[in-house]
Image (cartoon, grey):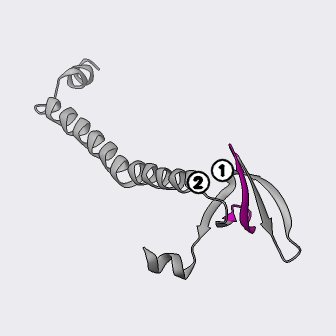
Amino acid sequence: MIYLNAAATTDSPGGGMSSLVTILMLVAMVAVFYFFIIRPQKKQEKQVAQMRDSLEVGDEIVTIGGIIGTVLIIKDDKLMIETGNDKTKLTILRSSVKSVLKDDEEEEEK
C-alpha cells in the first residue's frame, strides 16, 4: 500500500513538458476556432449590416420569410414595401431584409 502511494506522488521526468504541450494545444485550438469560425461570421454580419443600412427607396428586396417587394418608404428601423400584382403594401422591420435583388443593368455599371 505504501509503495502505491509513493509511486503516485512522484513526478514523472517530463511532467512539466506535458503541461506546456497541453497549454499550447489549447491555444492552437482557440486560434483555429477564431480564424475559421468567429472571424468569418463577424465579417458576414458586418456585410449584412452594411447592406441593410444602404437600402434605398426603389430597391427590390427579399425578406427572411421569402417575400419579394419594392421599398416604398424607409423610416428608422421600418420599411414599407409593395409586393404582388395587386400592389399590397407591407410594413416590415429593416432587420428582416435578407438580400437586395440586383438588376442586370446595375451589375453592368459596377
The residue that label 2 is drawn on is 52
Quarter where residue 55 is shown: bottom right
Instruction: Select label 2 or label 1 by which is in front.
Output: 2
Residue for point 39% across, 49% down: 39
Q: Tell me the amino acid under the disc marked 2.
A: Arg
Q: Where's residue 38, x and y in %?
A: 42, 48
Residue for point 60% across, 66% down: 100
Q: Where's residue 25, x and y in %?
A: 26, 43
Label 2 secondary element: helix
The residue that label 1 is drawn on is 95
* Mark 2–mark 1 distance (CA, rounded to whole Å): 7 Å
Residue for point 69% across, 61% down: 64
Residue for point 41% across, 54% down: 40
Residue 66 within the magenta-colored segment of the rendering? yes
Q: Is residue 32 above or below residue 81?
A: above
Give the magenta range: 62-77
**Quadrant containing the C terminus in the rendered view:** bottom left
Q: Residue furthest top?
A: 2
